Image: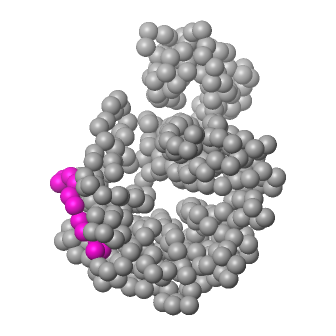
Amino acid sequence: MYFEFSNPGLVNSSPINISNHNSINKNVTISYNRPINQFDTVLKSSLVAWQSNRNGKWDLFGKKYFKSTGWHDIIIDTTSGDKNNPAVIYINDSTYIITYEKNFDIYYRQVNTITNFVSNEINITQTPSQKEVNPEITNFKESSSNLCLVFERYKQDSAKSLYFAKTPYSDLNFTNIFFLDSSYDNSNVKFFNSYLSGNFYSVYEKKINGISKVKCKEIRPNSTVGDYVVMRDSINQTKNYNNFHFPMIVDNQLNTLPSYACIFQLTKNNRSNLIFAYSAAYPPSQLVDSTYIGDGNSNSEVTINYGFRTLFASFKIYGVYTKDSGNISSLFMRSKIIYTASINQISSGVPDNFRLEQNYPNPFNAGTKIRFAVKDNNSIVNLSVYDVSGRLIKNLLNEKFDVGEYEYLYNAEELSSGVYFYSLKSGDFSETKRMVLLK
């Protein structure tokens, strides 16, 4: 089992073997210090956990990380019984919660990564007559004081219902269990959060007559639930939904709105594709990219990272998926850059040269569009505005771009009427054009 860092500006990195034991290690889960400021790219502390059969049964082991000391082993649970499907979540720099299933009940423990103390296990469900599996846990400190856990419970027809439990950070004690969804067959739960509302949003797959559909329930602070739309495709099969949130820059003053990028598997006409999209429900969310996975019967698994900030106005997301071919399952990865400022990629084709086009409209009143072309991947592009005396008014972009054509929406509300110049520079390329602001 390996772990690899990816940092802005890092060309090559080496994977770290974090299990290093001659046994089967699977169902890895990771959580880390995730600050409110999403522009912070420094990993300060982390806990990776997984299940291993090194002792002849499924036990839980982990690796803790601190920026000052690096990686160190930690034993989480080697008691009797098989522990499966762990899920770990960061509480603070010394405390993590890990949930797992054992004997068809859902348990949790607290883990102190400074002292290596692991609390006694607590059975959340305590239902000998029921079978509960696959716990998923999340917390979002920026908008909620609670921790939320969702799990699956088998019904008599072997389909599964969904239930959830919450606990405040003040006592970390799951007590009440609430119903989430019991119609048809539900599985593969994930979470995303709205930042602002204090609600939790549980995204999962609902299988109806053998066809999977991505559904979502809103879990409110008073523990009531309601339907929430994350996907409007009512025809095709959709599953394996994953997402992360990022701040969308909406003006030149760094005011932001929460947005999210997602990946999911869509099967249409027996052709299965991995879809990259962001900002809204699908459709009509903005489609970033898609890649072929296999036929409609392929058993793919999909995951996404939380996104890495590349430079000022973009995030890079990695989608990892399995692809079956000839009874062999291989692991693949695709990455896409999501631009979070007032810029859109309008073409991914390779232009003949770098190019700066005339802004439109021109003259303009407050808002105008500036198009430019990038010839080479990983090009640092600087777009700036100057007055007639050559004084720098504003640096609009200083970003790393891949090949393609881009359009920047420039809002000049803070400027007075007059003649201005905008300049594009990248490597040896430099071009300047004139624009007129009329108010």
- Give the left or right position of residue 429, taking residue 361 as reference: left
Image height of 389 relative to 146, above or below: above
- Give the left or right position of residue 14, taking residue 240 as reference: left
Q: Quadrant of residue 168?
A: bottom left
**In terms of depth relative to the viewer, which is nearer, 169 or 419?**
169
Q: Quadrant of residue 193?
A: bottom right
What colour-coding does the image apply?
one colour
Task: Residue 389 in the image: state x and y as whole percent.
Answer: 50, 15
Task: Residue 415 in the image: state x and y as whole percent.
Answer: 59, 31
- Give the left or right position of residue 286, taking residue 86 as reference: right
Q: Quadrant of residue 200?
A: bottom right
Image height of 102 relative to 383, above or below: below
Task: Residue 292 in the image: state x and y as whole percent.
Answer: 64, 37
The residue at 68%/49% (across/down) is 297
Would you say the magenta stretch is mainly helix, strand or loop?
Answer: strand
Residue 75 belongs to the span the image colors magenta: yes
Image height of 434 relative to 124, above or below: above
Quadrant position of the C terminus in the picture: top right
Query: Farthest right residue?
Result: 235
The residue at 34%/71% (across/down) is 57
**What count of labels does the image hold?**
0
Q: Which residues are magenta?
A: 68-78
Image height of 85 relative to 382, above or below: below
The residue at 52%/43% (across/down) is 328
**In terms of depth relative to the viewer, which is nearer, 206 or 402?**
206
The residue at 18%/71% (across/down) is 115
Residue 436 belongs to the span the image colors magenta: no
Say whether residue 222 is visible: no
Say whether residue 337 is visible: yes
Task: Residue 306 in the image: state x and y as whole percent.
Answer: 47, 51
Query: Farthest front residue?
Result: 327
